């Protein structure tokens, strides 16, 4: 699989599509279906990552009372949940950008969500280490 | 008894992999919803809202799995699968709402 372009797709004979799909993915032609499905699976993997952050954030607030003092614990919890929120939105935006790129036969966009996740994890670990050492 | 004819002959089993990926996501929503119940002593009724949200999403994914597999298998045969914009946006919206409820629960 070297190209996302679908050799079977004929742009002059596009079948009717849903309203949302026609509005958000208006240009180009249907890519190879295998790439569309792979893009969907990648989106779902990011959503599962976001869910892990959401559950982790709530768990910090509920179970880390012995580790962190009250205001710090709440801040860490809200930050962790916020990272989950950003990942979920970033996953949808990335899915849309990739789908559009494939439809237009353009190179895939750089994944900005990955440096964001790395930065957030690094910051979180630093904060936790500092708080544990200072405690 | 002869086995039923396969819906597609894709050697990469793309529809199966995608439906399984949705299945994993459904299980995770259900799991997170169940774990939220464990935190009821800490957050009170907020956990019920979180659990309900997770249960609705997991239920919707479960109910659409068969249709999804048929649509994707047909798409593989025809060489054209329409991107599932509605499912992607709905899942993102549900995850976003879940996060918002989580933050409200933590701050309350």
Image (cartoon, rainbow, N blue to C red):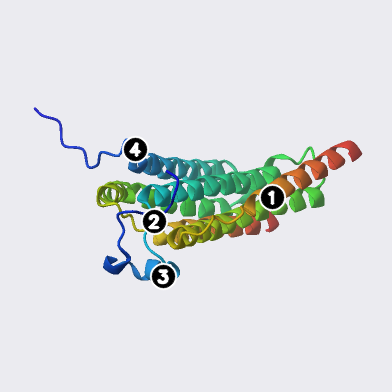
Q: Which residue is mark 2?
A: A31
Q: With respect to residue A49, does A87 lie above or below? A: below
Label 2, secondary structure: give it: loop
Q: CA distance from mark 4 to mark 3?
A: 28 Å
Task: Say if residue A131 shows up in the picture.
Answer: yes
How crowded pointer 2 is (Cα within 10 Å; few <14, some 14-19, many 20+) is rated as many
Q: CA distance from mark 3 to mark 2?
A: 13 Å
Task: Say if residue B55 shows up in the picture.
Answer: no
Q: Which residue is mark 4?
A: B13
Q: Residue A19: percent from the left, percent from the top? A: 36, 71
Which of disc 2 and disc 3 is earlier in sequence? 3
Q: Nearer the viewer, mark 2 or mark 4?
A: 2
Determine if marks 1 and 2 fall on one subunit.
yes
How crowded pointer 4 is (Cα within 10 Å; few <14, some 14-19, many 20+) is rated as few
Direction right: furthest residue: A134
Give me the disc on residue A26. Answer: 3
Q: With respect to residue B76, does A11 lie above or below? A: below
Q: CA distance from mark 1 to mark 2?
A: 27 Å
Label 3, secondary structure: give it: loop
Q: Nearer the viewer, mark 3 or mark 2?
A: 2
Which of disc 2 and disc 1 is earlier in sequence? 2
Determine if marks 3 and 1 fall on one subunit.
yes
Q: CA distance from mark 4 to mark 1?
A: 31 Å
């Amino acid at each position: 699989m070297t190209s996302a372009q679908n050799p079977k797709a004929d742009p002059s004979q596009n079948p009717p599509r849903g309203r949302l799909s026609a509005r958000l993915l208006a240009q180009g032609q249907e890519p190879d279906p295998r790439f569309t499905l792979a893009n969907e699976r990648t989106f779902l993997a990011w959503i599962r990552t976001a869910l892990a952050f959401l559950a982790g954030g709530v768990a910090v607030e509920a179970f880390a009372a012995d580790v962190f003092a009250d205001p710090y614990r709440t801040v860490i919890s809200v930050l962790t949940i916020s990272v989950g929120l950003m990942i979920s939105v970033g996953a949808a935006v990335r899915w849309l950008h990739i789908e559009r790129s494939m439809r237009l036969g353009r190179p895939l966009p750089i994944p900005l969500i990955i440096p964001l996740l790395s930065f957030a994890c690094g910051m979180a670990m630093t904060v936790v280490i500092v708080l544990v050492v200072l405690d | 008894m002869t086995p039923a004819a396969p819906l597609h002959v894709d050697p990469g089993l793309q529809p199966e992999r995608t439906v399984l990926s949705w299945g994993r996501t459904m299980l995770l929503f259900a799991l997170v919803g169940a774990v939220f119940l464990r935190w009821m002593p800490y957050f009170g009724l907020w956990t019920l809202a979180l659990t309900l949200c997770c249960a609705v999403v997991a239920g919707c994914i479960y109910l659409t799995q068969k249709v999804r597999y048929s649509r994707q298998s047909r798409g593989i045969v025809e060489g054209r699968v329409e991107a599932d914009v509605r499912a992607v946006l709905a899942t993102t919206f549900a995850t976003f709402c879940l996060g918002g409820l989580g933050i409200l629960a933590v701050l309350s």
